[in-house]
Image (cartoon, rainbow, N blue to C red):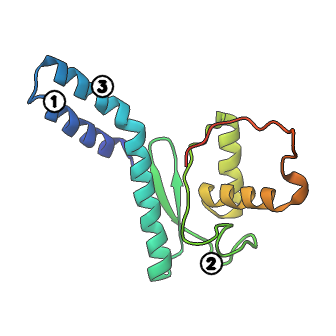
Amino acid sequence: MLTSTYISQVSDAVIALGQFGDEDTRRLTAQLAVALTPTIRTVISDVVCDMADELRRDHQLDLTVTVAADSLDFSPVPTEPLIDAPVTDGLVGDKTARFALRLSDELKTSVEVAAQQAGVSVNTWIVRTLHAAVSTPDSRPTRGTSVRGRGRA
């Protein structure tokens, strides 16, 4: 499923709203439509992933969602898990947090391949990998260790 079609529809609607104003309003809404594109893409991805979660939970349908730059794909999950992992995928409780993660193209491709080989979504693979990393005492940064990066919760 191509997400660009839906993103264009929202962008066009935002731009159309600007037509009710003056030239500054039209210019501002056009800039706003462009600025909203990453957020719209993320929201669409979240909706599809949440829908897949509901189908898994409420209808016992085993699905995985693959999120690429401009597409979302559903595929069935193998009936037997390829790796042993906790049911919660390392999440405690019902609350989750989101953060943006910037990866080089090469690392992103490697992560996608690893997740596909494990038979899980990229998100599940990342959560499991991070959970394993922080659950191992030797892998945690020690006092004085510099950890760089940006995140958003």
Crowd band around label 3 with a 10 angstrom C-alpha radius: few (<14), some (14–19), many (20+): some
Question: Which element carries disc 2, helix, strand or loop?
Answer: loop
Residue that carries the numbered disc 3 in the rendered image:
31
Looking at the picture, does residue 87 appear above or below residue 21?
below
Q: Residue furthest front?
A: 143
Q: Position of residue 135 (x, y in %)?
A: 81, 62
Q: Which residue is pictured at 60% across the width and 59% down the height?
A: 121
Evaluate whether residue 52 shows in this view. yes
Helix, strand or loop at mark 3: helix
Q: Which mark is residue 18?
A: 1
Image point 71% across, 59% down: which residue? 117
Q: Position of residue 138 (x, y in %)?
A: 91, 55
Q: Which residue is mark 2?
A: 79
Q: Secondary structure at mark 1?
A: helix
Q: Is residue 19 left or right of residue 99?
A: left
Amino acid type of the residue tagged 3 in the rendering? Gln
The residue at the far right in this view is 138
Classify mark 1: residues with Cα within 10 Å, few (<14), some (14-19) or many (20+).
some
The tag earlier along the polypeptide, 2 or 1, is 1
Q: Nearer the viewer, residue 109 or 138?
A: 138
User: Residue 50's image quarter?
Assistant: bottom left
Determine if residue 116 is in view: no
